[in-house]
Image (cartoon, helix red, strand yellow):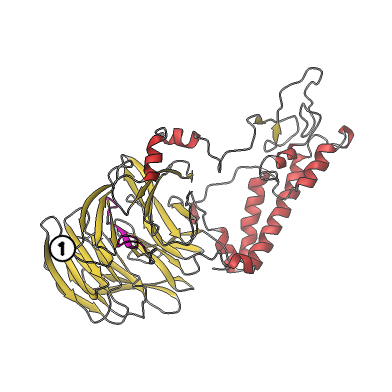
Amino acid sequence: MEAEAADGPAGGVEAALSCFSFNQDCTSLAIGTKAGYKLFSLSSVEQLDQVHGSNEIPDVYIVERLFSSSLVVVVSHTKPRQMNVYHFKKGTEICNYSYSSNILSIRLNRQRLLVCLEESIYIHNIKDMKLLKTILDVPANPTGLCALSINHSNSYVAYPGSLTTGEIVLYDGHSLKTVCTIAAHEGTLAAITFNASGSKLASASEKGTVIRVFSVPEGQKLYEFRRGMKSPHAALRSRYVTISSLAFSMDSQFLCASSNTETVHIFKLEHLASSRPEEPATWSGYMGKMFMAASTYLPAQVSDMMNQDRAFATGRLTFSGQKNICTLSTIQKLPRLLVASSDGHLYIYNLDPQDGGECVLIKTHRLLGSGTTEENKENDLRPSLPQSYAATVARPSASSASTVPDNIVPRKPEGQSEAVMMRRAPQKSGHPPSGGFGENQEGGRMACDGGRRVGGRNPRCPLLKPQDVARCSASPPQSRLPVGTGDAVYASCYWNYITAIMSMLTNHIGL
């Protein structure tokens, strides 16, 4: 995966990061600059070791390394139609090829080398660099969007098949024949990528709201994930995202997506839509079934959204609007999220593969310049971060610290639903605990007073507003709800909640 970065600020030949790319197994990072290119090893979190650097070719905007070998492919703005293949350990040029127009992207595996121009794709045999096939019937592809399976046993190629829709052409790089076309999205494509085995293909459109995963070579939709929603408000339309990269983990259990926003989304590929677990026999489960049943009477876009999964984990960046690429890699035996950005930094996060949640930033490396940066010096002075995920999740953070007290415990008075969560306060002398609905030892507040603790709303009754909470808390004892009415209250709340969601989806959804 490779990205061409925007021009950086003036101030030296290395001030601008022209491009950056991870190699096929995510063990190496390559960057191109005004001065040349550099290769880094990704074997350690604390150290970013430079494997090779060259200033022989200036103004590099494409650099791709073949796995952890010595073969590297470089394209420069000084000769944008020429591809140069080097053996960097020997310091020799293996070959160079010139094409009819500017080279937009290059993809490699152990059998094939793919050169993508705006209106054609060239497929080479990487062992002798012989040209095997030129695909000419390619719709205009100004960004050079294409993907090559890193599994050399199949060498599938994917590229856009339409100028106006998100159609994907799946091509067999071995037999040199078209396999199928996939109607992936309504809008034009923004990103596509294969998993390591070449059995799955992920795609995203320019709208950036939905990410889909298809089987290869059948082209059947396997998963559908949602990372955003179209908004009718002008102030929020600027939040439309541009997906800059998609990447599977090497074991194909996770898929990450980065964009021009400050959030990197990680999705878990575990349950298909047809294998959703049964809801428990509670009011929430009952209303959930009603919700799904009602979806069959809603517009197709709304019902499709109900079956879309959300992010399993997220990584928060300190910036937005900058070109970046992400990948998932195992470093020092633990899964990590890596993000390389046009600001000249590599960000490394811990990923909890069991519970997900917000990934913890554990290291920032500077890609330009030499020596240890001041930022990394400050990081080195901090206490070492925990390596276990249990310890990582337990670490307090300002953004994710829970405001829910520890004394929230389930309690089931006689005749009351198991779903009702009670607040058990420390017992005060002279105030024995009561047994009514929602009563606690502080004077009979309902369970709804949790609305003040979690974002101003009760996590079980999302429609309950703070003013309702205040009224509830100030109610005299005789006005409290009787025992056994909790289910009816929550049923009404869930129904209002579902009605509001249906209205919102019908009015605001956009795929």
In this view, the residue in front, 298 or 342, is 342
225 w.r.t. 349: above or below: below
Q: Amino acid at mark 1?
A: Tyr
130 w.r.t. 390: above or below: below
Q: Residue furthest front?
A: 11
Question: Considering the numbered disc 1 on the image, is that residue within a helix, a strand or a loop?
Answer: strand
Identify the residue position indicated by label 1 in the image.
86
Is residue 122 highlighted in magenta? no
Instruction: Name the residue rendered at 45%, 36% in the picture.
Output: 392
The spot of residue 95 in percent (x, y) is: 13, 69
The spot of residue 484 in percent (x, y) is: 78, 36
Instruction: Name the residue rendered at 77%, 23% in the picture.
Output: 433
Q: Quadrant of residue 460?
A: top right
Q: Quadrant of the C terminus?
A: bottom right
The spot of residue 476 in percent (x, y) is: 88, 35
Q: Main structural element of the magenta stretch: helix, strand or loop?
A: loop
In the shown orientation, is residue 89 left or right of residue 370? left
In this view, the residue in front, 290 or 412, is 412
In the shown orientation, is residue 381 left or right of residue 277? left
The spot of residue 414 in percent (x, y) is: 75, 29
403 w.r.t. 149: above or below: above
Q: Which residues are magenta?
A: 11-27
In the shown orientation, is residue 251 left or right of residue 474? left
In the shown orientation, is residue 332 left or right of residue 395? left
Instruction: Name the residue rendered at 64%, 36% in the picture.
Output: 404
Q: Quadrant of the N terminus?
A: bottom left
Residue 372 visible in the snapshot = yes
